[in-house]
Image: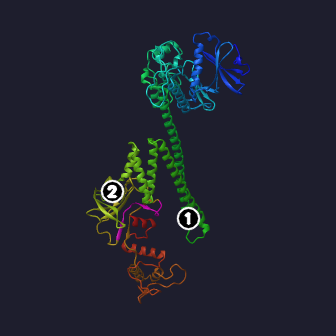
Amino acid sequence: MSARPGAEEEGRYEDLGPIAAGGMGEVRRVRDRVLGRIVAMKVLLPERLHLPDAVGRFVEEARTAAVLQHPGMIPVHELGWLPDGRPYFTMEEVRGRTLADAIRELHAASDRVYRPPASGLGLVGLLEAVRQVCAAVGFAHARGVVHRDLKPSNVMLGRHGEVRVVDWGIARIGEAAGPLDEEEPLRPAFETQGRLTGTPRYMAPEQVTGGVVGPQVDVWALGCILYELLSGRAPYASDDTLEVLALLASDAPIPAPSQRTPLPVDPALDALVAEALRPDPAERPAHAGVLAARLGAWLEGESRRQRAEARVAEARGLLERAEAAQVEAVEAERRASELLRDVADADPEERKAPGWAEQDRARELRRDARRYGTEAEIALQAALADAPDAVEIRRMLAARHHAAHAAAEAIKDHDAAERAEGFLRAELALLPDSPERRAWARWLEGTGELTLVTDPPGAVVRAHRYVPHGRRLVTREEGVLGTTPLIRVPLGSGSWLLTLEHPERETVRYPVFLERAGVWDGVPPEGGDPVPVWLPPRGSLAPDDCYVPAGWFLAGEEGHPLVRRWADAFVAKRMPVDNAAFIAFLDDLVRSGQEERALEVCPRDDFNKAGASTPIYGRRADGTFFLQPDADGDLWEPGWPVMMLGLPSFLAYAAWRSERDGLPWRLPGSYEWEKAARG
């Protein structure tokens, strides 16, 4: 500078050095001694002082900036003249960097995806800055002001998040356009045909061809800024000014930003850029406020999408924790079973405590799993509020409801199953077609597959479904499924009784429980082919014999998930061994010379205690047994189940019966009891 700033008012401004310089003037940092603050002072360059209109344009820039009182504009404090006649104006100093610097840093840090640099904003933050620029320029357009030289280097990003549009040096003021609340075209701020003004890379075609210049030239420039932010380069990025001008004049096609960068560009942003860069000004958004609104809508959607993604990530983590807790609970239950397997009810608590501790831990883990699952569902519902059309969120919710439905059915919690089914149906109604959706629909439909092989083949299979009636389950015939072998025959889920009818064999009752969309095939635990259901020859079973065919059944306690177990075929008596049958056994022992053995195994009043005890049955003179009143005076009936026996007595009876009938009679195991009872 040839003269110190503020020389006319000696001592008010202290020069602290240059900030920047441009074609028209330079900006210096000064201290305002009167107000005690640091401000920026823009001064016309000495060599520009005598150029036509230079002073007028400089003063117009100051006055234009002064009338645009908006958060996106730099406030102007004072307009004055130096002793050498050069004008100056002071304004707020924005400390920070330009948008051009931020864009370069973003693309230098990005590889395949946009990554925020260590010292700057990421893509969304810079898009918000561009939105604020659009809003500020839209404010100017509403007041009839067109900037005409918008570019990334004319946007300042302050240290405290402020975004300011600078360098209004070639702006023009025309007729005020009124409130900025509609997308109707503004009246041109001015209409002029004249010399070329602006920066070629960001100039609109009409600025080059001498057409009507209005707010749409700024819309074009803002489209160029957005283009550069997304792709890392201007639409016409040549260093040859004449080449850029020729491309502008010829309306050369501009590839979408997504075609100029390997980084992922949202198609909606591609479309917004394309709209702003239409060669015909009339086809562009009418003013910058339209761009601000559309970019704001996209950012709001992006913000909601990011919130949704964060909540989905939270839900995934919670579901993983829920699954891990379930796995630990199963392991704790297994350890508890091992620890308590050989512990009797009468054992001291010290022996039971380790097993009880594992049971308590399993219950706590299952509570944790339920809590994590509930929290995950809450997070997914919150994510859905931000992204109602997100298929992945609905898919995760559907998977959650499917799992809840399966778990509720496993423990026969009908209310919970009905609730989960309702939620699952609601989600499926909103999901697009996919293999997973079709699988869930089949699950709700409940149809499974039955494979059934018999020995010999050729049995007619009639299906009877168990249905509730009169507060109990009864069978209802549904029809004939076919003749064995049946291979992958469709059958609804639930409990069924199949009757297998063969002309040369006994009719066999074959219970089937088919899980939703499940498969019943009779394949044993070791795998391989299905085990054929053996059909006993006609007349081989006594009237009180119950033939239990081999197969799977569900075992376990009510209120807990049932476990599938396999049982080989066996025949059980329909009724327990009664007094009449047991007396026949004892009498046979007596007649065969085993009277002492008969006395050892007969019912006694204190059969569990050591020492002498009294037989329950009476004795005849020949040593045989008969029913007599017990010690309480009660007379046992012949058809009552035999009682007051120890295990050796039952084993002795089974051995005697096997020898007599030629069949391997034995006591049923606990799972065989359950298989015979459950079917």
Between the C-alphas of marks 2 and 1, the distance is 40 Å
Which region shows up in magenta?
A: 545-560
Secondary structure of the residue carrying tag 2 is loop
Q: What's the amino acid at mark 2?
A: Val
Image quadrant assignment for residue 661: bottom left
Residue 359, percent across and down? 56, 61
Question: How many numbered marks appear?
Answer: 2
- The residue singled out by tag 2 in the image is 453
For this rendering, which residue is in front, 66 or 431?
A: 66
Q: Is residue 115 visible?
A: no
Please identify the quadrant where the N terminus is shown.
top right
- The residue singled out by tag 1 in the image is 340
For this rendering, which residue is in front, 163 or 536?
A: 163
Residue 151, percent across and down? 55, 22
Instruction: Please tell me whether residue 547 belongs to the stretch shown in magenta.
Output: yes
Q: Name, please, the residue furthest toward the bottom.
A: 621
Q: What's the amino acid at mark 1?
A: Leu
